[in-house]
Image (cartoon, helix red, strand yellow):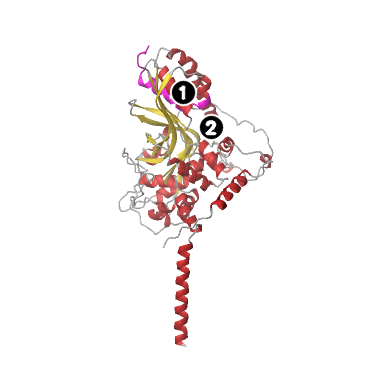
Amino acid sequence: MYVAVKGGERAIDAAHAWLAEERRGDTSVAELSTVQIREQLSLAVNRVMAEGSLYDPDLAALAIKQARGDLIEAIFLIRAYRTTLPRFGASIPVETAEMAVSRRISATFKDLPGGQILGPTFDYTHRLLDFKLAAEGQVPEAPTAPARLEPVPHVMGMLGRDGLIQSEAPGEETPPDLTREPMELPASRPLRLQAITRGDEGFILSMAYSTQRGYGRTHAFVGELRIGTVAVELDIPELGFAVQIGEVELTECETVNQFTGSRTEPPQFTRGYGLVFGQTERKAIAMSLVDRALRWKELGEDFTGAPAQDEEFVLMHADNIQATGFLEHIKLPHYVDFQAELELVRKLRREALASREAAE
Amino acid sequence: MIAAPPAAEDRQRWMGLFARATPAQLSDLMKDLPAHSVLRGPEVGAVMVRGRVGGTGQPFNLGEMTVTRCTIRLDCGTVGHAHVQGRDKSHALRAAVLDALLQTDRAEALRASVLAPLEAAEAAARQQRAAKAAATKVEFFTLVRGEDK
C-alpha cells in the first residue's frame, strides 16, 4: 500500500524563507557579492569547478553564495545546472606542455630547464594567523623579474629520453564519458581519471595518504607539479578549422614512482597522473597517487588488498554528490518502511517471549 | 563589398582573441554594432574539455566549460561566427559581428581599433603574470663547508 502524505507545504515555505534570511546573516554587515567570492575565495571557487565538472568561476561563486559556503552543496548546484546545458562538442586535448605557468616545481630534479618557480603558494608560510587580514588594508604589489614567455618543458620528457620511465601509449580514441553513460568496471585509465578529477578532494586525499602509509605503497615522488593557464581549442565543423574558445587554469601533477619490475615489466620508473581544474594542488597530487595505485594490474603488480588498489571501491565512492544523495536520503520520510520494521520487531519479540515462557 | 576571404590562420587568431577577451573589453572597443541579422543564438552551452593521460597519452574527459556561440549575417551577406568562453550573450554576439566585419573592407580600420588594443592588453597581462612568476624562481646557491680544505 502506498499512502501519499501531504501537508508540509506551509512548513517548507517558511523553512526556505528562514534559510534565505540566515544566508544573508546580520543585515548591518555588508552583503558579500559573487565577484568578491570569485576574486577572494578563489580556491573554494576552484574546488567547486573541479568537482562540479564545470569551468565557470562566476557560476561557482554564485553557487558558493547560495550554498552559504557549503562546498558540497555548491558542487551539487553546479552539477544540476550543467545538465541543463546543450553540449556543443569536445575540445582538442589541451597541451599542458604549452602551459603559461605561474607555478612549476620538481621534487626530483633541482636544476631543470625553466627552473623551480614557486608561484603564489602557501608553502613556506608559517601557518600563523595573520591578524592584519582582519583589518582592511592595501596589499603591497608582488615583485617582478624579467619574464620568460616561452613554455617550460615537462620534466618527464628528460627521464623519457633515457628510457628510464615508462612512456604513455599515444592514442586518439574518443574517451568514455561517465556523465553520458553509466560507469562500467573494469574502467579504462581515461575513465578512471575522469572519475578521480571530479571526485571528492577529501576522499581522494585520504586514498592517496593510505598508499603512502603502506596500503598499496607506490613510492611516489612529485616529478613535476605545474599550475597555469592553457588555451582550449574546439573544432568548428561549419568553419572547417579549430579555434580557441577560451583559457582555463589547470593544476597538473606527474609522479615518478620507484618500480623494481614485475612479471611483465622491466625495472623502470612508472608514472601517476593528476590534472584538475583551477589551482587545486592537493587534489592534483592526490589524484596522481591514486591513479598510480590503480594501475597495479596493467603493470603486473600484486593486489595486496589495499583500498586504493580496489578500482570499484575507489571509483564508486569518490563522488561526493552521489554519496551525499544516498547518505542524506535516509533523513527523508520513511514512515511506511519504518512502520513495517516496527511490526516485524514486535512480532519477533512476541514469538521470542512466547517460546521462552513455553521453555520455562 | 566582401573582401577576399582571410587566410584561416588570421581568422583563427582574431576569433581566439575575442573568445579570451572579457565582455567589457569588447564592448568598450566596439560600442555600436552595424545592422545584422542573427542566424543562430546567442546560445549558452558547454564544451567538454579534454586532457591527455600523462600529458601525452590517450585523451580523457576533464570536465566541461561554459561557452556561448552565435552566428550572424551582415546586410552585405558576410557571415560571422563566434564561440566564446562563459555565458555572456552580448559577448558572443559582438564577437560574431566583429568576425564578419573583419572579412569586409572595414577590416583594416578594425585591426587598428579593436585587434591591436586587445592584443596589447593580452600581451601586457601575460607579461605581468610571467614577471611575477619569474620573481618566485628559486636561485639555488651552495654553502661550502670548511673541512674539505
Q: Is residue B70 visible?
A: yes
Dot 1: element: helix
Residue A355 against residue A241 in the figure, above or below: below
Residue A347 against residue B95 in the figure, above or below: below
Name the magenta segment's main secondary structure.
helix
User: In which image quadrant can residue A255 be found?
Assistant: top left
Badge nearest the viewer, 2 or 1: 1
What number is the disc on residue B133? 2
Q: Read off the chain for label 2.
A: B
Contact between marks 2 and 1 (CB within 8 A): the answer is no
Relative depth, front residue between A160 and A130: A130
Which tag, 2 or 1, sits closer to the chain's start?
1
- Which residue in the rendered view is the most extreme toward the bottom? A360
Relative depth, front residue between A243 and B73: B73
Give residue A119's position: percent from left, percent from top: 54, 36
**Which amino acid, mark 1?**
Arg
Residue under the point 32% across and 48% down: A266
Share a chain, discs 2 and 1?
yes
Residue under the point 51% across and 22% down: B27
Q: Read off the chain for label 1.
A: B
- Tell whether position B16 is magenta: yes
Give residue B137's position: percent from left, percent from top: 54, 34
**Which amino acid, mark 2?**
Ala
Give residue B92's position: percent from left, percent from top: 45, 27
Please give the range of residues in magenta.
B1-24
Instruction: Quarter of the image for the N terminus of chain A: give it.
Output: bottom left
Give residue B87's position: percent from left, percent from top: 47, 32
Q: Is residue A252 visible?
A: no
- Tell whether position A246 is magenta: no
What number is the disc on residue B94? 1
Dot 2: element: helix
